[in-house]
Amino acid sequence: MRGLDSELVTYWVEEMHKPLTVFVDGSSGAVGVTLTELLGDRPYNLIHLNDHRDIDARYNAIAGADIAVLCLPNDIVADTINDNHGTSTVIIDASSFTRLNEDWLYGYFYDIYTGAANVLQSTRISNPGCFATGIQALIHPIQSWLTHYPLVFTGISGYSAGGNATINRQMTNPVAHKMTNITRQHTHVGEVRFRSGLTNDVIFLPAVGSFAEGQVVSIPLARHQLTIPIEEVYEQVAAYYYGCDDVVVWD
Protein backbone atom coordinates (compact mmCIF):
# COMPACT_ATOMS: atom_id res chain seq x y z
CA MET A 1 0.00 0.00 0.00
CA ARG A 2 0.90 3.66 -0.41
CA GLY A 3 3.65 3.09 -2.95
CA LEU A 4 5.87 0.76 -0.94
CA ASP A 5 7.62 -0.47 -4.08
CA SER A 6 8.57 3.01 -5.29
CA GLU A 7 9.62 4.08 -1.77
CA LEU A 8 11.89 1.05 -1.46
CA VAL A 9 13.54 1.73 -4.82
CA THR A 10 14.04 5.41 -3.97
CA TYR A 11 15.57 4.54 -0.59
CA TRP A 12 18.02 2.08 -2.06
CA VAL A 13 19.08 4.19 -5.03
CA GLU A 14 19.41 7.48 -3.13
CA GLU A 15 20.66 6.23 0.24
CA MET A 16 22.66 3.17 -0.70
CA HIS A 17 23.84 4.51 -4.07
CA LYS A 18 23.32 1.21 -5.86
CA PRO A 19 20.53 -0.67 -7.64
CA LEU A 20 18.53 -3.15 -5.58
CA THR A 21 19.58 -6.79 -5.95
CA VAL A 22 16.70 -9.26 -5.52
CA PHE A 23 16.77 -13.05 -5.38
CA VAL A 24 13.47 -14.93 -5.82
CA ASP A 25 14.13 -18.30 -4.19
CA GLY A 26 11.76 -20.74 -5.83
CA SER A 27 11.22 -18.80 -9.05
CA SER A 28 10.01 -21.88 -10.92
CA GLY A 29 6.84 -22.23 -8.82
CA ALA A 30 3.55 -20.44 -9.47
CA VAL A 31 4.23 -17.63 -6.97
CA GLY A 32 7.87 -17.29 -7.97
CA VAL A 33 7.09 -17.11 -11.68
CA THR A 34 4.51 -14.36 -11.16
CA LEU A 35 6.79 -12.39 -8.85
CA THR A 36 9.74 -12.64 -11.24
CA GLU A 37 7.56 -11.34 -14.08
CA LEU A 38 6.38 -8.39 -11.95
CA LEU A 39 9.93 -7.52 -10.90
CA GLY A 40 11.16 -7.66 -14.49
CA ASP A 41 9.90 -4.14 -15.19
CA ARG A 42 11.58 -2.65 -12.10
CA PRO A 43 15.11 -1.21 -11.95
CA TYR A 44 16.40 -4.20 -9.99
CA ASN A 45 19.25 -6.62 -10.47
CA LEU A 46 17.62 -10.06 -10.36
CA ILE A 47 19.65 -13.11 -9.37
CA HIS A 48 18.77 -16.16 -11.46
CA LEU A 49 19.67 -19.77 -10.66
CA ASN A 50 19.72 -22.63 -13.13
CA ASP A 51 19.23 -25.31 -10.49
CA HIS A 52 17.22 -24.44 -7.36
CA ARG A 53 18.08 -27.84 -5.90
CA ASP A 54 21.68 -26.67 -5.40
CA ILE A 55 21.57 -25.60 -1.75
CA ASP A 56 25.00 -23.98 -1.75
CA ALA A 57 24.10 -21.88 -4.81
CA ARG A 58 20.82 -20.84 -3.21
CA TYR A 59 22.46 -19.80 0.04
CA ASN A 60 25.17 -17.88 -1.82
CA ALA A 61 22.43 -16.08 -3.75
CA ILE A 62 20.67 -15.16 -0.50
CA ALA A 63 23.91 -13.83 0.96
CA GLY A 64 24.62 -11.81 -2.19
CA ALA A 65 21.18 -10.23 -2.43
CA ASP A 66 19.78 -7.13 -0.78
CA ILE A 67 16.37 -8.84 -0.61
CA ALA A 68 15.56 -12.55 -0.88
CA VAL A 69 11.97 -13.65 -1.34
CA LEU A 70 11.28 -17.24 -0.27
CA CYS A 71 8.64 -18.78 -2.55
CA LEU A 72 9.09 -22.27 -1.16
CA PRO A 73 7.22 -25.00 0.75
CA ASN A 74 7.10 -24.52 4.52
CA ASP A 75 9.60 -27.27 5.35
CA ILE A 76 12.22 -25.87 2.98
CA VAL A 77 11.56 -22.34 4.29
CA ALA A 78 12.21 -23.57 7.83
CA ASP A 79 15.59 -25.04 6.87
CA THR A 80 16.50 -21.99 4.78
CA ILE A 81 15.71 -19.53 7.58
CA ASN A 82 17.61 -21.61 10.13
CA ASP A 83 20.68 -21.97 7.91
CA ASN A 84 20.72 -18.25 7.03
CA HIS A 85 19.87 -16.92 10.47
CA GLY A 86 22.76 -14.48 10.68
CA THR A 87 22.58 -12.98 7.22
CA SER A 88 21.97 -9.25 6.85
CA THR A 89 19.92 -9.84 3.72
CA VAL A 90 16.29 -8.73 4.00
CA ILE A 91 14.24 -11.93 3.83
CA ILE A 92 10.58 -11.95 2.82
CA ASP A 93 8.78 -15.22 3.42
CA ALA A 94 5.95 -15.77 0.96
CA SER A 95 4.92 -19.06 2.57
CA SER A 96 2.71 -19.50 5.63
CA PHE A 97 5.61 -20.62 7.83
CA THR A 98 6.33 -17.30 9.60
CA ARG A 99 2.84 -15.83 9.65
CA LEU A 100 2.36 -16.93 13.25
CA ASN A 101 5.88 -15.92 14.32
CA GLU A 102 5.81 -12.64 16.25
CA ASP A 103 9.53 -12.12 15.59
CA TRP A 104 8.72 -11.58 11.92
CA LEU A 105 7.08 -8.34 10.83
CA TYR A 106 3.69 -9.09 9.34
CA GLY A 107 3.41 -7.34 6.00
CA TYR A 108 -0.18 -6.22 6.41
CA PHE A 109 -0.50 -2.51 7.17
CA TYR A 110 -2.85 -2.03 10.09
CA ASP A 111 -1.78 1.59 10.00
CA ILE A 112 -1.70 2.54 6.32
CA TYR A 113 0.27 5.69 7.03
CA THR A 114 3.21 4.13 8.88
CA GLY A 115 3.13 0.58 7.53
CA ALA A 116 5.49 1.24 4.63
CA ALA A 117 8.04 2.76 6.99
CA ASN A 118 7.84 -0.28 9.26
CA VAL A 119 8.51 -2.62 6.35
CA LEU A 120 11.40 -0.50 5.09
CA GLN A 121 13.07 -0.76 8.48
CA SER A 122 12.62 -4.53 8.83
CA THR A 123 14.87 -7.40 7.75
CA ARG A 124 12.45 -10.29 8.36
CA ILE A 125 9.03 -9.89 6.79
CA SER A 126 6.18 -12.39 6.61
CA ASN A 127 3.94 -12.00 3.58
CA PRO A 128 0.22 -12.12 4.55
CA GLY A 129 -1.99 -14.86 3.13
CA CYS A 130 -4.34 -13.96 0.29
CA PHE A 131 -7.65 -14.59 2.06
CA ALA A 132 -6.23 -13.19 5.30
CA THR A 133 -5.45 -9.93 3.49
CA GLY A 134 -8.97 -9.64 2.13
CA ILE A 135 -10.56 -10.46 5.47
CA GLN A 136 -8.44 -7.97 7.41
CA ALA A 137 -8.91 -5.26 4.80
CA LEU A 138 -12.67 -5.49 5.41
CA ILE A 139 -12.81 -6.18 9.13
CA HIS A 140 -10.02 -4.05 10.57
CA PRO A 141 -11.63 -0.62 9.93
CA ILE A 142 -14.66 -1.68 12.01
CA GLN A 143 -13.11 -4.23 14.37
CA SER A 144 -13.40 -2.01 17.45
CA TRP A 145 -17.20 -1.88 16.94
CA LEU A 146 -17.77 -5.62 16.62
CA THR A 147 -19.83 -7.40 19.26
CA HIS A 148 -18.96 -10.89 20.52
CA TYR A 149 -21.27 -12.68 18.05
CA PRO A 150 -19.71 -15.14 15.56
CA LEU A 151 -18.69 -13.92 12.11
CA VAL A 152 -19.00 -15.56 8.71
CA PHE A 153 -16.35 -14.95 6.05
CA THR A 154 -16.77 -16.12 2.47
CA GLY A 155 -14.07 -16.08 -0.16
CA ILE A 156 -13.54 -17.21 -3.72
CA SER A 157 -10.03 -17.26 -5.14
CA GLY A 158 -8.47 -17.84 -8.54
CA TYR A 159 -7.22 -21.37 -9.06
CA SER A 160 -3.56 -20.33 -9.40
CA ALA A 161 -3.47 -19.77 -5.62
CA GLY A 162 -3.64 -23.53 -5.15
CA GLY A 163 -0.29 -24.09 -6.83
CA ASN A 164 0.66 -26.35 -9.70
CA ALA A 165 -1.57 -29.25 -8.62
CA THR A 166 -4.71 -27.08 -8.61
CA ILE A 167 -3.71 -25.38 -11.87
CA ASN A 168 -3.19 -28.71 -13.63
CA ARG A 169 -6.48 -30.02 -12.26
CA GLN A 170 -8.33 -26.98 -13.58
CA MET A 171 -6.70 -27.34 -16.99
CA THR A 172 -7.65 -31.01 -17.34
CA ASN A 173 -11.01 -31.01 -15.56
CA PRO A 174 -12.37 -27.44 -15.36
CA VAL A 175 -14.90 -26.55 -12.66
CA ALA A 176 -16.76 -23.26 -12.32
CA HIS A 177 -16.83 -23.23 -8.51
CA LYS A 178 -15.52 -25.60 -5.85
CA MET A 179 -15.59 -25.32 -2.06
CA THR A 180 -12.25 -26.04 -0.39
CA ASN A 181 -10.99 -26.85 3.12
CA ILE A 182 -14.50 -27.41 4.43
CA THR A 183 -13.49 -30.30 6.71
CA ARG A 184 -10.72 -28.50 8.62
CA GLN A 185 -9.82 -25.11 10.09
CA HIS A 186 -8.40 -22.91 7.35
CA THR A 187 -4.88 -21.65 8.07
CA HIS A 188 -5.87 -18.06 7.27
CA VAL A 189 -8.39 -17.95 10.12
CA GLY A 190 -5.64 -18.64 12.65
CA GLU A 191 -3.48 -16.05 10.93
CA VAL A 192 -6.17 -13.38 11.21
CA ARG A 193 -6.74 -14.19 14.87
CA PHE A 194 -3.04 -14.11 15.71
CA ARG A 195 -2.18 -10.93 13.83
CA SER A 196 -5.31 -8.82 14.30
CA GLY A 197 -6.40 -9.98 17.75
CA LEU A 198 -9.87 -10.97 16.54
CA THR A 199 -11.60 -12.95 19.30
CA ASN A 200 -14.93 -13.74 17.64
CA ASP A 201 -15.76 -17.29 16.62
CA VAL A 202 -15.37 -17.52 12.86
CA ILE A 203 -16.94 -19.62 10.12
CA PHE A 204 -14.92 -19.38 6.91
CA LEU A 205 -16.24 -20.68 3.59
CA PRO A 206 -13.42 -20.60 1.01
CA ALA A 207 -13.84 -21.62 -2.62
CA VAL A 208 -11.91 -21.78 -5.88
CA GLY A 209 -13.33 -20.25 -9.05
CA SER A 210 -12.75 -20.81 -12.76
CA PHE A 211 -10.56 -17.71 -13.11
CA ALA A 212 -6.78 -17.80 -12.76
CA GLU A 213 -6.01 -14.87 -10.45
CA GLY A 214 -7.76 -12.56 -8.00
CA GLN A 215 -10.18 -13.05 -5.16
CA VAL A 216 -13.43 -11.81 -3.69
CA VAL A 217 -13.98 -11.82 0.09
CA SER A 218 -17.33 -11.00 1.71
CA ILE A 219 -18.34 -10.54 5.34
CA PRO A 220 -22.11 -10.36 5.81
CA LEU A 221 -23.03 -8.36 8.92
CA ALA A 222 -26.25 -8.08 10.90
CA ARG A 223 -27.17 -5.22 13.23
CA HIS A 224 -26.60 -7.29 16.37
CA GLN A 225 -22.97 -7.88 15.33
CA LEU A 226 -22.10 -4.18 15.63
CA THR A 227 -22.18 -1.56 18.37
CA ILE A 228 -22.66 1.19 15.77
CA PRO A 229 -25.62 1.56 13.40
CA ILE A 230 -25.02 -0.64 10.38
CA GLU A 231 -25.56 2.43 8.20
CA GLU A 232 -22.28 3.85 9.56
CA VAL A 233 -20.16 0.94 8.37
CA TYR A 234 -19.51 2.55 4.99
CA GLU A 235 -18.49 5.84 6.60
CA GLN A 236 -16.04 4.10 8.95
CA VAL A 237 -14.42 2.07 6.16
CA ALA A 238 -14.22 5.09 3.86
CA ALA A 239 -12.67 7.19 6.64
CA TYR A 240 -10.10 4.51 7.44
CA TYR A 241 -8.89 4.31 3.84
CA TYR A 242 -9.12 8.03 3.13
CA GLY A 243 -6.03 9.18 1.25
CA CYS A 244 -4.93 5.65 0.34
CA ASP A 245 -4.65 5.60 -3.44
CA ASP A 246 -4.58 1.80 -3.64
CA VAL A 247 -8.01 1.27 -2.05
CA VAL A 248 -11.35 2.24 -3.55
CA VAL A 249 -14.45 2.19 -1.31
CA TRP A 250 -17.83 1.95 -3.02
CA ASP A 251 -21.14 2.71 -1.34
Image (cartoon, rainbow, N blue to C red):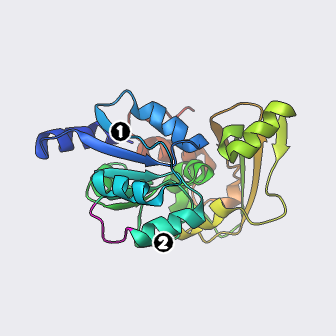
Residue 136 in sight in this render: yes
The range drawn in magenta is 84-88
Q: Residues within 10 Å of mark 1 (few under 14, many from 20)?
A: some
Q: Which residue is mark 1?
A: 46
Above or below for 93 versus 159: below
State yes or no: residue 86 in magenta: yes
Q: Nearer the viewer, residue 171 or 182?
A: 171
Closer to the chain start, of discs 1 and 2, is 1
Q: Amino acid at mark 1?
A: Leu
Name the residue rendered at 29%, 36% in the picture: 6
Please state, as top left, top right, bottom left or bottom right, where the N terminus lies in the image.
top left
Instruction: Name the residue beneath numbered marker 2.
Output: 101
**Foreground residue, 245 or 184?**
184
Res. 173 mark: none
Q: Name the secondary structure under disc 2.
A: loop
Q: Position of residue 41 (x, y in %)?
A: 37, 26
Q: Where in the figure is residue 75, as x and y percent of width and height?
A: 59, 66
| Picture residue at 81% right of the left edge, 39% below the top | 169
Image depth: mark 1 or mark 2 in front: 1
Q: Quadrant of the C terminus?
A: top right
Q: Is residue 192 above or below residue 246?
A: below
Q: Amino acid at mark 2?
A: Asn
Query: How far across and how far down the image is residue 140, in percent?
Result: 51, 56
